[in-house]
Amino acid sequence: MNTFIRRAEEQDIPVLCKIWKDCFHDSEDYIRLFYKENFERIDVIVNTVDGKAVSMVNIIDCLFVSGKEEYKAKYIYAAGTDPCFRNKGCFTELIEYVICSAKQNGTVLFLKPSNAGLIPFYEKSGFKIDSYFRLLTVYPGEKQPLTLTPLSPEEYNRMRNETFSSRSYVKWDNRHLRWCIKENEYFSGKTVSVNLNGKDYFIMAYPDSGTLVINETNFSPEQLKQLCGALCDMFKTKLIKAYLPDFSCNEGEKIVSSAVYNSPLNNTYVNLILI
């Protein structure tokens, strides 16, 4: 079997959509929207057999930042292989190609394993677990008046950078924020600021089967408990599940948020890694 690795082209998108759907079971409508909005700004690398893509990685540029230090980084997203070509070394060959390129360019790589069973594979390739979420479940209590103000990508990014600049974190550009907000809206979510005791906070959240899923926020666990009733009332949900960094929360289920390769930083906060 002869394989060849190359950048994906626009005519590959139908095949990319099929691989993505077979691997992650997202709707075709969502996957096509992702490529419509992002194909020109990201790198999509494929391993091919007889010219047809059989394995793929979607790569999004960002920065690993700590104080005045900045390191070019690439986020590996929705990486997978056509089920007919699994266990043939196609994906291993592809990830080794991406790693080799990162070595040559001095670039950090990171990803979020889609399930715990994949962690040994990536560790064998040289990745190491670096950071964790806490998935905090909160039930509503007493409601209080609350006003939500929509945030632009630029304003959200400004607030986010201010919040996490005191530690090592992933810094995204405004184009990525624009997509994250659009993606959140696709799932009937809102990206808003909330004023609490004279201070503005940000929250990106969407309702899912009676649960308000908070993808990112700078609220503390205690503040979320305080506001849960109002937020659930606004989103018509029964409870909240919030992905919080483990440095700000010690409650809830501990979940791997990133595996990194070639990073000089440790415990780097990485959210906005897509729903």
Image (cartoon, rainbow, N blue to C red):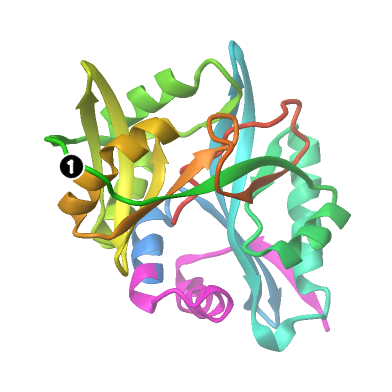
Residue 161 image position (x, y, % from top left): 43, 23
For badge 1, the amino acid type reads Lys
Q: Which residue is drawn at 23% across and 32% down?
A: 193
Q: In this view, does 248 lie above or below 96?
A: above
Q: Let me know if residue 219 appears in the view.
A: no
Camera-nearest residue between 232 and 152: 232
- Residue 271 in picture, x, y percent from top left: 51, 41
Residue found at the very far bottom of the displayed protein = 84
What's the magenta region?
1-30
Q: State the image quarter where residue 53 is shown.
A: bottom right
Name the magenta segment's main secondary structure: helix
- Rendered location of residue 229, percent (x, y): 23, 46
Looking at the image, can residue 171 be seen?
yes
**Left or right: 119, with 268 as reference point:** right
Confirm whether the magenta stretch covers residue 3: yes
Residue farthest front in this picture: 142
